[in-house]
Amino acid sequence: MTLPNLDLPPLLPEIILIGMALLLLVVDMAARFRDARAEGSLMAGLTFASVLIAAGATAAGIGGGDASVAGVVLVDDLSRYLNLVVLLAAGLSVLLAWAYVPQFSRESSSFYALVLLATAGMMFMGKSVELITLFVSLEILSVSLYILTGFNRHQLASAEGALKYFLLGAFSSGFFLYGLALFYVQTGSTQLAEIAAQDSGGVLLLIGLGLLLVGFFFKLAGVPFHMWAPDAYQGAPTPVTGFMSVATKAAAFIALFRVLAAVPGVPVEVWGWAVAIVAVLTMTWGNFAALRQKSLKRMLAYSSIAHAGYMMTGLVAGTDALNAILYYLFAYAFMNIGAFAVAAMLERPTPNAPQDATIDAARGLFDRRPALATAMAIFMLSLTGIPPLVGFFGKLYVFGAAVSAGWAWLAVVGMLNSVVSAYYYLRVVVVMFMAPEDETSYVRSRIPAGAGTAIAVAVTGVLLMGLLATPVFVELGRAVIALR
Amino acid sequence: MTVPLSWYLIFATALFSIGFFGVLARRNAIAVLMGVELMLNAVNVNLVAFWRYLTPTDLSGQIFVVFVFAVAAAEAAVGLALMISIYRTRKSINVDELNELKL
Amino acid sequence: MLSFAWIILVFPALGLLINWIFGKRMGKSYIALVASAAVFASFLTAVGLAAGLAALPADARAVTVPLWSWIHIGDFQVDFALLIDPLSVVMALVVTGVGFIIHWYAATYMLVDDHHRELSLRMYGRFFIYLNFFILMMLTLVLANNYLQLYVGWEGVGVASYLLISFWFYKPSAADAGKKAFIVNRVGDFGMALAIMWLFFLFGKEAGSLAFADIFHAAEGAGAAAAGAMTGITLLLLLAATGKSAQIPLFVWLPDAMEGPTPVSALIHAATMVTAGVYMIARSHPLFEMAPTTMAVVAWIGALTALMAASIAIVQTDLKRILAYSTISQLGYMFLGVGVGAFTAGIFHLMTHAFFKALLFLTAGSVMHAMHGELNIDLMGGLKQKMPKTYWQFLIGAAALAGFPLLAGFWSKDAILYEAFLKSPLLWGVGIFTALLTAFYSFRAVFRAFHGDPRSEHAEHAHEQSPGMTFPLWFLVIGSLFAGLLGLPALFGEHVNVLGNWLAPVFADLEGEVHGSEGLELTLFLVSSGVALLGIFIAYARYIPEWGWAKALQRLFSRLQPVLENKYCVDEIYMAAIVNPLRRLAEGFYQLGDGCIIEGIVNGVGAVTVRAGGYVARMQTGVLGMYALSFFVGVVLVLLWFLLFVT
């Protein structure tokens, strides 16, 4: 028996991240830190550096052709763009976590190690072309995120969200795994390429696909598999919420693309309708549930569900919508993590942990911190989809893809939903700009440098990607070519 | 007499359903976790049976099972840790009582 | 040659940025200077553009100045580009010209807040930032060369309007008014978005862009085949226009928008933004002409809005609200104009209206300052002696509004009514009756506010405002007096209609225009003059000598008064028919989040399988169990769906 040909350099970014994760744990064991903040800063700095390097390594590889590693992962432009989305989300979240985590934890090293592992898991998931790898990478990211969600052990909400996320996540893993097993039965292979080479579908394959979709819907927080999301998002430390609401979706979308592209003999009408209906349910439920939320974070959690719904509309267009969804994911990374970062600035510190910010905490924010309020307004307007901000183009491209694939009604439902969403996003703007300050308002007296940088980067991203929509979109078109 | 493949499949499906039911019906978080474990193991039975009957020369099925074991173990560890963390504050791991997080 | 056009956008953007970044370190006078200078520079640029355009041969007067490639999907491309043609230049001149004067006026006006306390530097700066932002967005709107960019401007001015209406954010009424304006406008904007998407589906492939010229070309190519779709698209565009321009059914926000500072009412809610709907229809005229049904709807909406709003204005006592309803009514005339195909007349009225309505609002602002915030005309009286300059300014504005012969409003209203008559005498009838009401309510305001004896303490002690506020208004007075000469009717000769000749290339494709005889034109001309004078006379009779017959006339109509005072109860109807059900729907959905639906499903399942009911009921009590159950329902549905396809 010969070892498979391990061609490492294509996986350099992942190796960097995993190596750094291990290094962090070692450093933690070797060094004694007197101060949680000093430890936090060192760990965050190292993590951020590794994320930057990994992103650099990824970006350098764009356009460099496909490389298959051991037949289980495929490094192509699609996966490279996914890497960038995930690393962008991770980078912004690390900046936000920089001063945030030491507020409640002395275990920054494990925090950042887990972030790195989850990131690596997502990156692997997006390039898996083999079922076992897909499952294992999914679990790597899931298990890391379970812990990260419950990382604030002093807060019951955090642990509660984590436990719910975990139990339902494990539950959905069961279905996902069953689906993979059925794929294996029907085709006798775990390689997507070999599965795709089969001519006919068969009953088991269909059921398997159904179960797989369930697993993916769960990760994407699609209704009715979404129940965990508001709780987990609200309970998790805010940087984690921002990170997982964006990066997990990104990885799941790309992996789902690869699976759907490989399923033989299942016409798009079959899975397309399932996706379309879940998309409609998801955006509608998310938007309507968000309308009356009092907690800013929970409102953003529901909004995040709604956005998953918007992105799903692109799925029905198949491969042609890939760059649309990638664009949306980049857009979403900027505006959503930006919004969570501002939300984190409004959290009132308590002895144990920052307290969840209510929307009312933003009352009169414009008077106290005009820049912060303006940034938040930009994020909210962008999430609403008001041109010329990036959120508008994300919707335009995704809905446009759905329309050109013959799913115009889906785009119309999406449009209607964006109108509903305007109500709760703009409520935040109203509160910040119009409402007078009162005892409920709170904003940190000093914005930490890390969070400030994250917000500034996010604003820049939202504005620039909106104005340069065309070049970015064309660039992302490489991903489509990659999968054709 | 050899046991036909369909028996394994029916057995696995039954096991999966029992686990499924456990998740839906039990209120103790540990029992819910056990339900999940049953579901994962049902899939393992499936995988091994498929491997044995369909592709005995290809090891993918077996490898899959090994990975599932490892993953299930990791999940159990994380899950139990979370439960301990909750138990410390609540003195209970009844999932029904965990409803801090809503609107 | 006109490639410098983009700097017209740079000035307000610069003004905005300077005030934003350095505002706190500059004094109020510098803030106002920067903001006004920015708009003035834009105005000069617009003049330059007009001159540059005039130098071109008439049929070449449509120059596209591309800025950058914005959206690129396959063969489809939307550039960020400016369209410089006679129509957009007229709009740009009005926006920047009137805008500049209003900035100038606001520099003094905004020194104090709505309670006559000194306004903080921060709020002062913010006001001018918003104002410059508005100018920027309005210019983006009128100079857009494609529908998407128009939409950007459309939304942008909506945001500016919203921010400025609720500028006195501590007043709940102001915050509510802002919200109302925003929500009502979203309804219209939704129509706009749908219309653009529809155009995109229909012609996107063929036209390769959303640029006006390409779309119109493609639409003409499609011809009768697209007639049905064209009606739908134009109706959606009309919905958008009724939102922005406060027409039936979406006019309800504009009276409330008077909560904003008065310069805002003058600039946004009278002179410029609210006319965007008219501009958009005029800009889209090739589409509207392909949809005769929509054109008729536009005309009738305009006529009825004009009538309805004018009738409400008769009984209002709040000076700014009278002007607000009057604005709605005048916008109705513009709709009537573009609805009967008289696009030039519609734009002409838009322009003259910008002058005299801005003048009226700004003088109302002066009165408001003099009266310490009091706007009730019942509590005024005798202001003529106290504030003579303001009186003359208001009088000239009111006369122009009333259609006093030879003033600006007279010519433009007459142009519209004449063409309406050619289309349908009934429309003309509604219009001319509205003209009577208009003349009455404008002079009712004049007589009640400025004549007679002071009826309150404030009126007793009112005094003229400083030159900073009165001087700029003389420019608007000039406009109100003489702007009408730009659009003299054909009665006076072949080429006297300067504006008509200027706009001719834009509306050149209009063919088959019916021309009436000169005799008819002269007759209608005299009827209009007579009606305006009659309205003014009735107002005089009722309020100055208070003759018995005039009071009797009022009693005759007193039955109508409650309906008018309640503004036909439109707000209440909307509340009951639309807002409340929606709110209930939202609450319903919100409760779904708490498990209502799941409970329902669980109960349904329970009814079928009674024996399992016990377990199911227990499941539902558990929060996590419920989550898992929802999951389970999802799995079942997905699998059922896939199994359907097995067979």
Image (tube, rainbow, N blue to C red):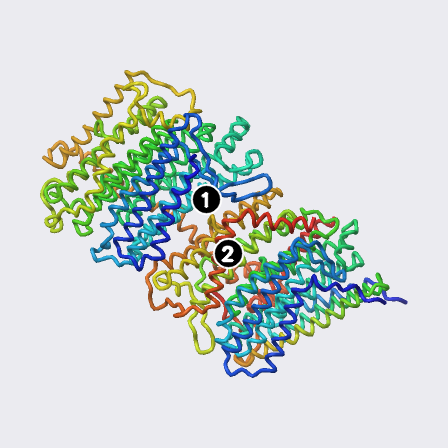
B63 on left or right of C503? right
- Residue C264's tag is none
**Image quarter hosting the N terminus of chain C:** top left
Give the residue number, with chain letter if any, for mark 2: A461
Task: Identify the mark at residue C190; answer none if there is no mark.
Answer: 1
Q: Position of residue C158 (x, y in %)?
A: 38, 46
CA–CA distance in space, label 2 to label 1: 27 Å
Q: Residue at x 76, y 60 (%)?
A: A71
Vertical placement of residue C584 versus C490, above or below = below
Q: Amino acid at mark 2?
A: Gly
Q: Amino acid at mark 1?
A: Phe
Relative to residue A183, is residue A200 depicted above or below?
above
**Label 1: few (<14), some or many (≥20) within 10 Å?**
many
Chain letter for mark 1: C
Where's residue C430, x and y in %? 30, 29
**Relative depth, front residue between A223 and C286:** C286
Quadrant hosting residue C524 = top left
